[in-house]
Amino acid sequence: MEKVLIAGQWRDANASSSFQASNPGTRELLPAEYPVSNWEDCNEALDSAAAAAVALRGISGARIADFLEAYANDIEANAEAIVDLAHAETAYPKETRLAGGEMPRTTNQLRQAAAAARDGSWALPTIDTSTGIRSVYGAIGPVCVFGPNNFPLAFGSASGGDFAAAIAAGNPVIAKANSSHPGTTRLFAECAQRAAEATGMPAGMVQLIYRTSHEDGERLVSDQRVGATGYTGSRHAGLKLKQAADLAGKPIYLELSSVNPVAVLPGALSERGSEIADEFTGSCLMGTGQFCTNPGLVLLLAGEATDQFISDITAKFAEAPVGTLLSAGVEKSLATNLQVLVDAGAELLVGNSAVDDGRFCYANTLLKVTATQFLADPEIMQTEAFGNSSLLLVADSVDELVQTVASLEGNLTGCIYSDTTGSDDAAYDRIASEMRVKVGRLLNDKMPTGVAVSAAMNHGGPFPATGHPAFTAVGIPGSLLRFGMLQCYDNIRAHRLPEILQDASPNGTVWRSVDGSWTQANI
């Protein structure tokens, strides 16, 4: 049985049962056995995290940056072992996905977080010299991170964006591994613990629990010792955690569900329909469709160009190799939710069948509905079929497209393809106006599956894409604010202020740190 990391020590878990991960490419269980911790483990981890949070108040951002950089270095030194195990647990390609994509992104995020911790600009220090009031964001306290199944490295609970942001903001992290890749998470936690010891971090800086009961998970996120939680996963499980956290008044940042609408206007189809068909097919089937920004809803206007586009992508989906899904649960959920859409009236164009009983997979699938059908029951028609599938919607008018967009739930992304001559501009303006408030990131003429680690990125959106539309899970320094609390100082003696607030300006002005430089604004 694998050990948990609690209070700086790898030890046997207080386990109620155990589980094994599967190799998605063979459906076979992997040999390592992982514990399902009971509340005793959670309670001890919370005590240790609370003590670490107190110790971190006296540790500078520069020292936290040292830890993050040492951690990134240790990951790179052990990259081959991490990639090998992640490949076994997810079936993701080693070179093109894991070593060539997620691994450099993971270490880059950690180093960006280190830079933010060192310069302190994320904390938005504000000084009002006319009133003697100053404010700054500070650490919120222990953070629980629940990682998703689809990004074992770059979104992992002990390595990904939520982890990096929480640590850079000065908080200890309790990582809850995803059951699809517990071994990969363990390797990251081993690297993190070595880096913590080498840089003198408190014992509970990083802790790892593999799985708990649902009841203990809800108890964990609502515990008084927790500052906040970051969660990426299913809507059903996430809403259970949110209910528990909300009742306790604890912030929880959720990424739950998104169909990521893509509107392709007639002028664009006439101008470059074949290219867009290639872009859409590549985006939708990339990683077997297991991206949170996968284009799961395509909005089209009826016409000859649209008919040709639908014919083209149907043929491409039929011809494309069928990728491997992450788990039996993903396979079952995809099949179930596609059938929900078919039962609601969606026309099957291709797929919707099992194809290979030797691995977790399902046929590349396209469904089609009219705007009238969609608008008759928009809730059921927005069922997320997570995987290598998409729903095509054909409207008879721009008015119907606008109504469709207005009926959408919140999404991470929304995209509009239009022509370069301006014939689509009138329709674009109306659709974009509605789509803008429905999505966190609005795109033009590109598919949404790439999420750059940029300070300007918003990987968030209105519910149910996330639990709060004002925050991003990707993009440093902005992502750190989820794990900070605004701390105000009124008439505090200068020597008692945090160092970042000790620079005053004359003449009643506000000074705010942005990207490491001080800017001034009159009040």
Image: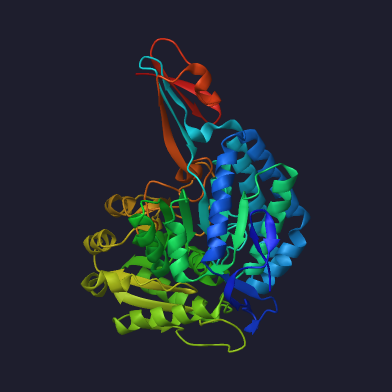
Number of numbered labels in the structure image: 0
Q: Is residue 147 visible?
A: no
The one nearer the camera, 516 or 320, is: 516
Residue drawn at (78%, 54%), measured in percent from left and top? 77
Q: Seen from this angle, which residue lies furthest bottom?
A: 357
Q: Colour scheme in the image?
A: rainbow
In the rendered view, would you say 478 is above or below 146?
Answer: above
Vertical relation: 272 (above or below) 133: below
Left or right: where does residue 371 sit relative to residue 504?
left
Q: Residue at x 29, y 50 (%)?
A: 433
**Residue at figure coordinates x 38%, y 46% from the top left:** 470
Q: Nearer the viewer, residue 190 or 1?
A: 1
Quadrant that contains the C terminus: top left
Quadrant of the image containing the N terminus:
bottom right
In this rendered view, identify the residue nearer to me: 75 or 63: 63
Whether residue 118 is visible, yes or no, is yes
Horizontal side of residue 393 vs 15, given as left or right = left
Q: Indicate the position of residue 340 as horizontal and vertical percent values.
A: 35, 81
Q: Position of residue 335 (x, y in %)?
A: 44, 82
| Camera-nearest residue between 458 and 14 | 14
Q: Is residue 158 above or below residue 388?
A: above
| Residue 61: image location, x then y, percent | 61, 35
Expressed as whole percent of the image width and height from the top left, the position of residue 24 reads 61, 78
- Residue 5 vs 420, above or below: the answer is below
Q: Residue at x 49, y 68 (%)?
A: 284
